[in-house]
Amino acid sequence: MDRKQVEQKAEELVQHVAKGCISRYEGSWTLSVYDTAWVSMIEKPDGNWLFPESFKYILQRQIGESGWVSHASEIDGILNTLAALLTIEKHLCKENSLSDLEKSDLQHRKVHGLTFLQNALEHWDVGSCMHVGFEILVPALLSMLEAYGIKLQFPSRPALDAVSFQKSRLFKAEMLYGPYQSTTLHSLEAFIGKVDFLRLRHHKVNGSMLGSPSSTAAYLMNISEWDQDAEDYLRDAIQHGGGFGLGGVPSAYPCEIFEFTWVLTTLVQAGLPSRSFQNEAVSRALSTIASQLRKNKGAVGFASGMLPDADDTAKAIHILNALGQPTSPKQMVSSFMSPKGHIMTYMGERNLSPSANCNALICILDSPDMGELWADVEKITNSLCDCWWENKMVDKWNLSINYSAMLLAQAFTRLVQRWDFASLRMLPDTLIRDRVVVVLVQLLNRVLFGSSLLSKDAARSYPESVAYEVLTCSALRSLPLSRTILSQLDSVIEDGRDHLTTVESTWETNQYLWIEKITYGSQTLSKAYCLAALYAKTDDSAWSDEIADLFQPAPDTSRKLTKFFQMVHVPEEPAWKYETCVLEGATFAAKLRSCRTAIFPSRDGFKDKYLTYIPATWTLVNNFRGLNLSTKLLWEMMKFSMLDFLVDEYMETSVTLLNISERALVKECISKDLLPRVSETSVPWETNISKIVAQDESNLSERIGAVCTVLAKYVKEVMRHPSVRAASQYDRTQLRIELHDFLIAHIIQMEDNTQLYQSQKDGNPDMEIPIFSSARSSFYNWARTTAAQHISCPVSFAFYSCLLNSSSDIKHPNDCFLTPEQKYKASDFCAHLAVMSRLFNDYASIRRDQQERNLNSVNFPEFHPSSSPAKLTPDAFNTNLPLFKNSLLQLGEYERRASRAAMANLVDEIHSRDQGRSGVKQETTSKGIELFAYVTELFADIYVAKDLTNAAQ
């Protein structure tokens, strides 16, 4: 399809939605079994069914000997089946109007529906459900079925009751009787028996209760005086809501403002020529919307007269500004800005909507009042960054992850442009550099690594979702990225357009992506997004050097890192993947360097090479393995990885300079003051830390006091971390134990170093290499105790476990690993990783350890024949060095295989026996384990290829 054809189809679509705004609206939404079931329950005053065709529609939509359809999520099938069973029960109660065959058929359908429903409820993950009002609708319908003797129990019922209580505890019926609309009017079926429906008549809009057929049906069923307006509305919904008079209704009707504004803003942003929007119908529709804005104090809803919301308001203001009618978004901001700094779709909503905040931000950025609203831009931007960093981008209005990605890309590329062009220089540069750019680059990687198009998996996606993906890439394409990355974006765009052209006949089929009470699709919106994706311009934008440097930092260094990671990871993978991971890592580099000296002093003459490698290591594994774990988790582990290097370096350069008695005092300080091995509740260990940090320990010498002060700051940084404080007591205790053992292991290593090299106190370590024949344990036991603890893997995993399971809204958090089996297998998994890391680390540092007089694995007798002398000459050592290194590699690979087997066992254990978590939490924990495992492996592989540790001297 060429651009002229796209323009022609777009003009036809614009004309269609404009007419819907100014004359009769013809619905394009998919039909709703749930709403139709409610419509089918209405009895006329004479006792007959008002809409028998709707009941017929329900029976036709039952799936064989099962329940009713789950279009795109489990809640669809649950709600559809609950409502369908309720209408069947109501029809069975009027048995005089049914033949024996009809009664038998309905009973048969009821049995199969109940079987389906029970199974669906058994597997329902309440915690992951985002649909509008499910927490009040499902309990209400379950209660209604109980009146017919149907009682259903299921594992997530307590979780459902808890969220239902939180939603309904502030509800008072009197709130509905006043003059103002509320979202409750959209779901009145959940309040049957709780409100006086007659006192709600004044809320009708064109006969409907907030445009909801199910809510309007509930109203009509529960008033003592027949309401002809409500009946007329429902007849109109059946005839013109997309069901062609066959009984079905959509989940909302009409929605003319929603479809008009969404279609036009989508096409305008794609760059369709202005002539596409210059006709009488569009002008009249725009006048109607402008009039609605004036009437409703700067806000509109999804249809004329409906409760205003931020989403539709933002789209309405945006299209007016885009088509030459300057309109201020100030009232929108003042009406919908929450005290927490984000835009609420509706007042009092339970969950923030990323898409609504993106639409509001785009609206402001394209408005004449942008500069005056910079503080609000900052608030919304921070809220969106928080959502991204905490992996809370799942939207409440659309199921496709590509939808939120598209809007975020469009909003943040605009934001960076406005900031670069000095229109929003009032915004802090750290917001752009350390947050927005991070989000954009991570979004770039999510798209490129997870693209259904590059994986040739688009056939499984709805065309509308593919269009979102293309539009995301089109927005990102405007950034000052390298030619290699731009080429990959172009490939996604080209493949996406080819696919959309191929499946054009399916654009207007039912695509269940949008969320209401149930999931629905809109043929009109699908066509608009597909046309926009085919047309969207991908012209390069002009950028300042300041912004260009953020997206192409230090080209020479980036090229070297790209080649290095490709070499040590999977050389067969294309270079662009490593380049994008290195770019993502670089977006954290400045922030990481700013934390470098917060605890440990810097050392003149040392470059801290590891600061360049740490971020890319975490981003690479997260991207290559498609884990998409939170930015917050990645960032915290980047910082902790840096601390691992720094504390190791500090112990080897500062603590090692102390004499034996001084080190013993430091050891005592660690065990008695900083990290005592007793219950947290009985020892004021944090008080001890504070005293040491304040250098209030007069009993310590200056040298020892300086060391203990630094270590106390380190312990404080770890143990007072918000995620640690929010973790369970067990997880906090385990972290404290591992942190203690980690620090003590360094001192034990120093003692072993002294013992090993004591015969060379005055000699040259290059002249002879000692064998540790007086070791306090075998090499095997040493590798699993002191050596493993010294390598920092166990303490890192303990800290990581706190991050994985921490949550500020849980008063009594569970342990990260709930059962004894999980705890044991997690420890076994970590133990193998720790030994592997130590073996590979020793492989890379044999020469350095020899020069710095550090104990290395190869000093143990197990690496030498029993006939060997107590010391090796340099020649003998060099002769045997390849054998030593090969043994370390073989043992390291053995532990790698063991850690992977342990990981598989642990993940299986979590999924098969973990009943204390939702499916989403199980999945996050499993992915978290995978991330830690493969990052640890990558660090080990890096050790083999390149020693990143600063020399001790």
Image (tube, rainbow, N blue to C red):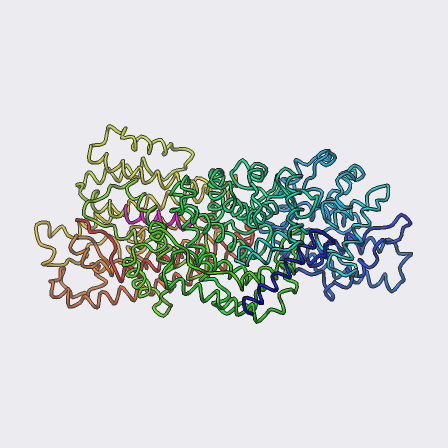
Q: Nearer the viewer, residue 483 or 821?
A: 483
Is residue 899 covered in magenta? no
Q: Residue at x 53, y 55 (%)?
A: 269
Is residue 637 covered in magenta? yes
Residue 729 position, x and y percent, is 45, 41
Q: For residue 821, say whether it is visible.
A: no
Q: Residue furthest bottom?
A: 502
**Quadrant assignment, res 842:** bottom left
Quadrant in which the N terminus appears: bottom right
Q: Nearer the viewer, residue 320 or 940?
A: 320
Q: Residue at x 65, y 61 (%)?
A: 523
Q: Residue at x 39, y 61 (%)?
A: 899
Query: Chief secondary structure of the magenta span?
Result: helix
Q: Is residue 600 left or right of residue 814?
A: left
For the record, the magenta segment spans: 632-646
**Quadrant assignment, res 845:** bottom left
Residue 299 position, x and y percent, is 62, 41
Q: Give the number of callouts.
A: 0
Q: Is residue 221 left or right of residue 774?
A: right
Q: For residue 443, say whether it is visible.
A: yes
Q: Is residue 569 above or below residue 606?
A: below
Q: Residue at x 54, y 35 (%)?
A: 339
Q: Nearer the viewer, residue 836 or 550?
A: 550
Residue 358 position, x and y percent, is 52, 48
Residue 374 position, x and y percent, is 47, 39
